[in-house]
């Protein structure tokens, strides 16, 4: 276990290094931030001054070395447009994204798994077939369009829910969140639903397939023959065995919901990290882009680690030391 | 077709009609967020429009960018044209209760161009000031090395801050509100980056009392969501209504639209300098000399553009065909220049005269996320060029890629827009058409490297002429020279659309800003 974690940490450091270099060079290759940020009225001298202010007058390799040096001290640079540390900007917006992603994942788990099990246990029933047809829509309709439709129906036509933005924030147990207020829930329902739709469909299909596979296996037949109640067979024996693929997918999906909720955050003007990164890319705010990518990579590594550990919990046959990947 | 008048003069009457007290909360949705509450950190429209609420300038710009008294009640050059004198308003207090004096102006002018890490500061507007002389608490003199007739226009961009709080203050302290203290109609309450800016009426404002108790400005970048938020009643005013929605919204009783022409001209810049230009070849490939150096070719391209069609078809009627750099009514606009008539036959003749009767192959470049319908306009122009026998391709790209490449002179014909921040003609003339001269700060955006000594001489004279009438005539003359040479090809002026609740309207501004003081009851 310890060896496993040490090896993972080393891998993480290498990934971070490579990634930061790629992003650094990538943003450099896209274009010149000053050309976008500078006021049109600026003279050539003003432009030169801005280039120096942002430290862009040095050769790219020198800029990268300076960045690495600062990064070792925990400073990932100051945003060009906010003039604040990139890390702080990202952390400021992280709670908004986290609460959105968590609500979306919970929605997709608590809607997706029961529906998927239903469809798996009764594949020929009308309900089972409807669930599967419905899940195709969740897959195939563009996220952006779904979001606009949700706003149109629930905010514009029915007027039940707010059209955009995050609700009032309150503090509870030391955590600042809009989930502690009613107004916050009113604001989060639509974007969380929008974010959850794709994953719900994914989980429904995955659950159904797993249930279909497991239900015919000997141990299930044996459990039934033993006279266990149907509830116990499905709720314990089946459910526990289908959890392994589900946990992998849910873990990765949580990570990608946090990292790439860009479309939903843009449509609903949700003040999260996704909105920040897309705005930063538009103006080539390199410190924010690089810092964001590093945080996201770290998060993916951490979640993968947790998923691997969870495997061994769900399936005692899996031993962590064996997983040399 | 949905039509409105875009006349400049019509809006002035509305300002006077605004009632003084109309207490309520106002929520405005804008397309792009303000990134900083430091009034001198980043000179960009998204930030500047917020500063107009919290701070005053010595001289304010009205809806048509006309100069109005702000913290200065009167101003002008003294008998010595190298010295400008400003008489300041007495009895004005900052939001923290301290008195405003000339010393605050002196401090502001030294800070404006000198904020650490600034990606685009205000030094552009203060660079001419050699010395600041505080005569008494309410008189200040600015000394320059040469006459600077545009001093008043330049200073109309700079927010006045308090010395007591501002000295040594960082951008962060402005963001937190700690030192964000101005004399403007609203005071800063809360700044949540990416989410909201909340402001509250300043009860002690020296001018007309603000009509709103609180003003909340929220960024909604998706235009469909912005329109939906207005329809749902979650916001009272939205900026940048997309042209595709305008016809439908104009028939909706739950929404009112306000429109006005902007100071922004959309134009084609042509590489009229280099012997060979990167994006032009003979038909079917093969190098040729740069045809754009020939004035007849440039003229042919201008005749080939059907400006009415661009306005009607691409812009859905929400734009004005352009024949020069600013719409009529602005300072320095020439009365002698008309919009060129669409004449493809004349264009072909001119091409033949210049020896390009068989045409040539060209790629047009432009942004696809910067101006209203920019990529569609570029495609329309490409088709029009095809009609006169050019083999035309279009390459539209995100602005983050486009502007850097354009400034590196990688293109031959490019679509760009220019808004005159000072509200008069010298701004585009100096930046776009004057010979590229870094020492003077001329031609900083002259991406075609057009150069004409006669033009430069007239512009130089204009920029040293303090008398307004004489300067205006010189600027018009310079514009005529440039347009006669087809230094650039203007296509249209943008018209901006704001959406409001049906009981409100917005007084459109040529500088494209969305300001709470411009939101007034419907007629």
Image: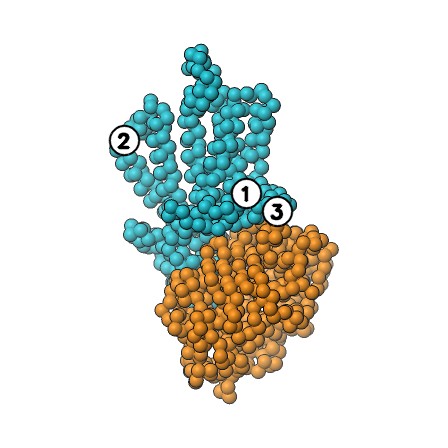
Chain colours: A cyan, B orange
> Depth check: B146 or B125 in front?
B125
Residue B111 falls in which quadrant of the image?
bottom left
* Protein chain holding label 2: A
Looking at this view, name the residue that lies furthest to the left.
A3
Residue at coordinates 60% horizontally, 66% vertically from top-left? B22
Residue at coordinates 51% horizontally, 37% vertically from top-left? A196
**Residue B55, image x and y in percent?**
49, 69
Residue at coordinates 43% horizontally, 63% vertically from top-left? B177
Which residue is tagged 1? A190
> Depth check: A226 or B124 in front?
A226
Which residue is tagged 2? A1
Q: Is residue B156 above or below residue B305?
A: below
Q: Could you say which disc has been placed on residue A159 in the image? A: 3
Q: In this orientation, does residue B319 appear?
A: no
| Secondary element at image label 3 | loop
**Tag 1 and tag 3 share a subunit:** yes
* Protein chain holding label 3: A
Q: Circle 3: is it few (<14), some (14-19), or many (20+) Cα within 10 Å?
A: some
**Residue B60, image x and y in percent?**
54, 73
* Protein chain holding label 1: A
The quarter in which the N terminus of chain B is drawn is bottom right
């Amino acid at each position: 276990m310890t060896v496993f974690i040490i090896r993972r940490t080393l891998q993480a450091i290498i990934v971070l290094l490579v990634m930061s270099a790629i992003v650094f060079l990538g943003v450099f290759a896209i274009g010149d931030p000053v050309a976008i940020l500078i006021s049109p009225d600026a003279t050539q001298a003003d432009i030169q001054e801005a280039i120096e202010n942002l430290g862009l007058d040095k050769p790219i390799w020198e800029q990268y070395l300076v960045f690495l040096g600062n990064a070792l001290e925990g400073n990932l640079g100051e945003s060009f447009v906010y003039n604040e540390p990139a890390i702080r900007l990202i952390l400021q917006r992280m709670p908004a994204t986290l609460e959105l992603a968590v609500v979306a994942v919970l929605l997709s788990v608590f809607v997706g798994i029961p529906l998927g099990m239903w469809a798996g246990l009764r594949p020929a029933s009308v309900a089972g077939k409807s669930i599967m047809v419905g899940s195709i829509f969740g897959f195939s309709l563009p996220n952006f369009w779904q979001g606009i439709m949700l706003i149109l129906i629930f905010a514009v036509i029915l007027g039940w829910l707010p059209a955009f933005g995050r609700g009032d924030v309150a503090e509870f147990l030391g955590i600042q969140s809009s989930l502690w207020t009613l107004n916050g829930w009113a604001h989060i329902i639509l974007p969380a639903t929008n974010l959850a739709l794709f994953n719900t469909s994914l989980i429904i299909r995955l659950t159904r397939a797993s249930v279909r596979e497991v239900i015919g296996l000997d141990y299930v037949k044996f459990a039934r023959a033993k006279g266990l109640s149907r509830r116990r067979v499905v709720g314990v024996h089946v459910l526990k065995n289908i959890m392994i693929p589900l946990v992998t997918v849910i873990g990765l999906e949580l990570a990608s919901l946090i990292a790439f909720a860009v479309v939903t955050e843009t449509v609903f003007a949700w003040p999260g990290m996704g909105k920040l990164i897309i705005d930063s890319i538009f103006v080539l705010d390199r410190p924010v882009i690089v810092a964001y990518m590093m945080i996201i990579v770290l998060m993916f590594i951490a979640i993968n680690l947790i998923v691997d550990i969870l495997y061994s919990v769900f399936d005692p046959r899996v031993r962590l030391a064996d997983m040399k990947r | 077709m949905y039509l409105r008048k875009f006349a400049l003069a019509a809006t002035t009457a509305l300002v006077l009609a605004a009632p003084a007290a109309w207490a309520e909360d106002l929520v405005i949705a804008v397309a792009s967020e303000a990134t900083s509450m430091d009034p001198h950190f980043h000179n960009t429209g998204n930030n500047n429009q917020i500063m107009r609420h919290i701070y005053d300038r010595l001289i304010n710009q009205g809806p048509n960018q006309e100069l109005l008294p702000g913290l200065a009640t009167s101003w002008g050059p003294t008998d010595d044209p190298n010295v400008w004198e400003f008489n300041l308003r007495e009895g004005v207090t900052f939001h923290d209760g301290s008195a405003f004096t000339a010393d605050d102006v002196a401090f502001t002018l030294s800070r404006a161009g000198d904020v650490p890490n600034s990606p685009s500061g205000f030094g552009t507007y203060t660079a001419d000031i050699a010395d600041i002389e505080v005569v008494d608490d309410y008189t200040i003199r600015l000394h320059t090395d040469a006459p600077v007739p545009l001093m008043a226009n330049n200073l109309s961009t700079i927010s006045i801050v308090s010395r007591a709080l501002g000295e040594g203050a960082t951008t962060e302290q402005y963001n937190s509100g700690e030192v964000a203290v101005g004399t403007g109609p609203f005071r800063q309450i809360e700044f949540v980056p990416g989410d909201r800016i909340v402001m509250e009426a300043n009860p002690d404002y020296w001018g007309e009392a603000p009509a709103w108790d609180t003003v909340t400005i929220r960024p909604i970048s998706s235009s469909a969501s912005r329109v939906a938020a207005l329809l749902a009643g979650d916001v009272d005013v939205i900026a940048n209504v997309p042209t595709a929605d305008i016809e439908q919204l104009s028939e909706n009783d739950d929404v009112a639209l306000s429109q006005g022409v902007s100071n922004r001209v959309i134009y084609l810049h042509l590489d009229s300098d280099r012997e060979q230009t990167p994006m032009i070849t003979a038909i079917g490939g093969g190098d040729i000399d740069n045809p754009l150096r020939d004035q007849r070719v440039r003229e042919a391209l201008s005749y080939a553009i059907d400006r009415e069609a661009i306005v009607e078809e691409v812009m859905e009627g929400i734009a004005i065909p352009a024949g020069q750099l600013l719409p009529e009514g602005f300072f320095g606009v020439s009365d002698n220049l008309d919009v060129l008539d669409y004449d493809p036959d004349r264009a072909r003749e001119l091409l033949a005269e210049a020896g390009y009767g068989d045409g040539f192959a060209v790629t047009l470049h432009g942004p696809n996320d910067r101006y209203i319908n920019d990529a569609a306009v570029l495609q329309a122009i490409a088709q029009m060029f095809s009609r006169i026998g050019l083999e035309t391709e279009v390459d539209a790209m995100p602005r983050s890629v486009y502007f850097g490449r354009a400034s590196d002179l990688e293109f031959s014909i490019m679509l760009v827009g220019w808004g005159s921040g000072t509200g008069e003609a010298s701004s585009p003339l100096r930046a776009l058409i004057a010979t590229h001269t870094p020492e003077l700060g001329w031609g900083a955006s002259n991406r075609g490297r057009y150069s004409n000594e006669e033009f430069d001489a007239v512009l130089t004279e204009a920029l040293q002429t303090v008398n307004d009438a004489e300067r205006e005539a010189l600027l018009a003359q310079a514009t005529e020279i440039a347009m006669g040479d087809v230094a650039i090809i203007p296509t249209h002026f943008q018209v901006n659309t704001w959406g409001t609740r049906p009981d409100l309207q917005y007084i459109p501004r040529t500088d494209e800003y969305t300001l709470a003081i411009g939101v007034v009851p419907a007629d």
